[in-house]
Image (tube, rainbow, N blue to C red):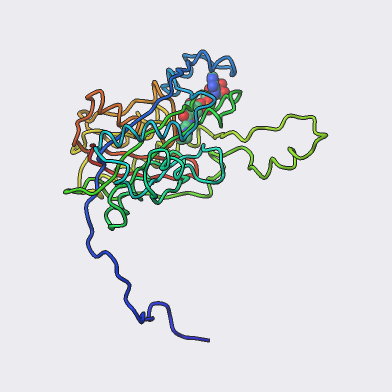
């Protein structure tokens, strides 16, 4: 048996690597909300609930649903075109496309290569990531590292969901919460640090807390049984709302505080707080737990957009910038959390 450990192996030849660490920032943000506005009254056709209850318990007044023929790639394309335009970056400058989604309905191929093709991005690295409502913040972290290490100069990061396809409209615990939409960011080389260290993690023992109700392979026997007369249950996303709620409120605020500290800042330095738009009451509880100074504006896009999972943070930040609620060049704290359970938080300079 060899006693040589990997660490003591000296390679015969040296591999060339980029030695210089660079700065990265978000150059432009874009958002897309589907046209159709869905009211709480419409949702209440399918569940025993009321507009008043939904508004009180979640803060949601309306959400958007995509057309039946509108795909996550269509929505991602619209948000990306806006982000590229605002960044002043051409498709040919993009070296990688990272798409965060859990509702692209194909196991393979990934959505990112098709999106890149539609946008005319020539031959980029293109892949999807599955980190649910924390997907966008994971994407920003990956893009930041790619740019800082010199792997590519510009990365297109997209958070997109068509959750209406994966919602059981009869499920009282989730039917009112989810919406559809897309947000995109162009991350690229910068003269100054524009993305702080990411605080992230996962709790795999909590996998049942938010989950697809049935696996695709679990459906197969039922689909292949021609004599079966019961309905096959669509593998919608379901959640234990209260458990998620408690975890988000008690465990995510300390992560957010650490993300601010890791960037060498204090909550007083923030110009915006953009948490994942999960529930308005979660946002309110986080503000308290964070002791967020009153002067810091807080994203409340959930009221009109619902919970769009991976899309919620870039959509909410775009809205704040568009409506003059947050300043271009200001510092924002963003935190995503969701199915996994997984989470990711970082401070960014807004484009
Ligand atoms: O995006 C990341 C993943 N998701 C989230 O972050 C969501 C986190 N969770 C939540 O936002 C909340 O848990 C919900 C909004 C989903 C639910 O609110 P809640 O305050 O946690 O409601 P609950 O489950 O504790 O139920 C309270 C009451 C119950 O009645 P009783 O037992 O007090 O009489 C429920 O039966 O509300 C009842 N209820 C409803 N009533 C009207 C539950 N769902 C509904 C409904 N309409 N849709």
In this view, 284 is above or below 199: above
In this view, 325 is above or below 259: above
Place of residue 263 in the rendered image (x, y in percent of width and height, measured from the top left): 23, 48
Quadrant assignment, res 315: top left
In this view, 52 is above or below 81: above
In depth, the one of 184 and 273 nearer the eye is 184
Q: In this rendering, would 195 be left or right of 344? A: left
Place of residue 31 in the rendered image (x, y in percent of width and height, measured from the top left): 35, 30
Quadrant the C terminus occupies:
top left
**How many marks do you count on the picture?**
0
Q: In this rendering, would 174 be left or right of 4? A: right
Q: Residue at x 28, y 34 (%)?
A: 85
Place of residue 121 in the rendered image (x, y in percent of width and height, measured from the top left): 36, 44
Q: Residue at x 55, y 46 (%)?
A: 108
In this view, 177 is above or below 95: above
Q: In this rendering, would 100 be left or right of 169? A: left
Q: Is residue 130 visible?
A: yes
Q: In this rendering, would 218 be left or right of 103? A: right
């Amino acid at each position: 048996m060899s006693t040589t450990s990997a660490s003591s192996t000296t390679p015969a030849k040296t591999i060339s690597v980029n030695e210089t660490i660079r700065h990265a920032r978000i150059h432009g943000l874009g958002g897309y909300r589907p046209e159709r506005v869905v009211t709480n009254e419409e949702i209440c056709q399918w569940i025993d609930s009321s507009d008043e209850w939904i508004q009180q318990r979640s803060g949601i007044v309306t959400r958007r649903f995509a057309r039946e023929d509108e795909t996550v790639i269509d929505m991602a394309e619209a948000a990306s075109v806006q982000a590229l335009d605002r960044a002043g970056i051409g498709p040919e400058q993009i070296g990688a496309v990272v798409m965060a989604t859990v509702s692209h309905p194909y196991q393979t191929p990934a959505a990112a290569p098709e999106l890149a093709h539609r946008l005319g991005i020539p031959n980029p690295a293109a892949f999807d990531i599955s980190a649910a409502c924390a997907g966008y913040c994971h994407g920003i972290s990956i893009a930041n590292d790619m740019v800082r290490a010199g792997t590519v100069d510009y990365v297109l990061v997209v958070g997109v969901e068509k959750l209406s396809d994966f919602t059981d409209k009869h499920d009282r615990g989730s039917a009112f919460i989810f919406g559809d939409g897309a947000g995109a960011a162009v991350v690229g080389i910068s003269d100054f640090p524009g993305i702080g260290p990411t605080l992230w993690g996962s709790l795999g023992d909590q996998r049942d807390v938010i989950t697809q109700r049935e696996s695709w392979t679990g459906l197969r026997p039922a689909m292949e049984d021609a004599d079966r007369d019961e309905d096959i249950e669509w593998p919608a996303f379901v959640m234990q709302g209260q458990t998620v709620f408690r975890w988000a409120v008690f465990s995510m605020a300390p992560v957010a505080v650490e993300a601010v500290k890791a960037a060498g800042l204090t909550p007083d330095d923030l110009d915006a707080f953009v948490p994942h738009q999960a529930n308005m009451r979660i946002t309110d509880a986080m503000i308290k737990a964070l002791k967020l100074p009153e002067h810091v504006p807080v994203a409340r896009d959930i009221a009109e957009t619902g919970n769009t999972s991976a899309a919620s943070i870039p959509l909410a930040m775009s809205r704040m910038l568009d409506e003059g609620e947050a300043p271009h060049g200001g510092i924002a704290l963003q935190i995503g959390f969701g199915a996994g359970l997984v989470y990711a938080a970082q401070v960014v300079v807004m484009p």
